[in-house]
C-alpha cells in the first residue's frame, strides 16, 4: 500500500486483519477517502493459492447501515 497515505494506526489495523482475518470487516468513510483501495489491497493479500476465498462487498454511498445490518454479514 505504498501509494496510499494511510495513518500508522490504520496501517497496523489492516496488517492485523490480514494476518488474522475475522468473518467480517467494516470500513467506513466519506466518498473518495480510499475505502475501495484499502478493500482491494486486503482482498489481494488474503487470496492464496491454497483455495478460493469469497469476498462480499456491501457498498452504500447514500445510506447508513445500522448495527443490525452489520450483524447480518
Image (tube, rainbow, N blue to C red):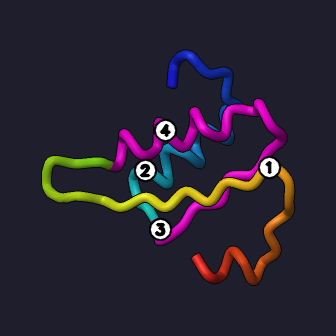
Left or right side of 56 for 30: right
Residue count near mark 2 (Cα–Cα under 10 Å), binned few <14, some 14–19, many ≥20: some
Q: Which residues are magenta?
A: 22-46
Q: Which residue is mark 3?
A: 22
Residue count near mark 3 (Cα–Cα under 10 Å), binned few <14, some 14–19, many ≥20: few
Spatial CA span between label 2 and label 1: 25 Å
Q: Which structural element holds mark 1?
A: loop
Spatial CA span between label 1 and label 3: 24 Å
Spatial CA span between label 4 and label 2: 12 Å
Task: Please tell me whether residue 50 is drawn above or below residue 33 in the rendered image.
Answer: below
Spatial CA span between label 4 and label 3: 17 Å
Q: Are marks 3 and 2 in contact (CB under 8 Å)?
A: no
Query: What label sits on residue 24 in the rendered view?
Result: none
Q: Which residue is mark 4?
A: 40
Quadrant containing the C terminus in the rendered view: bottom right
Left or right side of 18 for 58: right
In the image as oriented, which residue stretches furthest toward the left?
50
Single out the mark in the foreground, 4 or 1: 1
Magenta residue check for 25 = yes
Q: Which residue is mark 2?
A: 18
Amino acid at each position: 500500500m505504498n501509494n496510499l497515505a494511510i495513518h500508522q494506526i490504520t496501517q497496523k489495523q489492516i496488517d492485523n486483519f490480514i494476518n488474522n482475518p475475522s468473518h467480517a470487516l467494516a470500513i467506513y468513510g466519506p466518498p473518495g477517502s480510499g475505502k475501495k483501495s484499502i478493500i482491494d489491497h486486503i482482498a489481494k493479500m488474503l487470496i492464496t493459492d491454497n483455495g478460493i476465498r469469497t469476498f462480499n462487498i456491501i457498498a452504500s454511498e447514500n445510506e447508513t447501515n445500522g448495527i443490525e445490518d452489520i450483524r447480518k454479514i
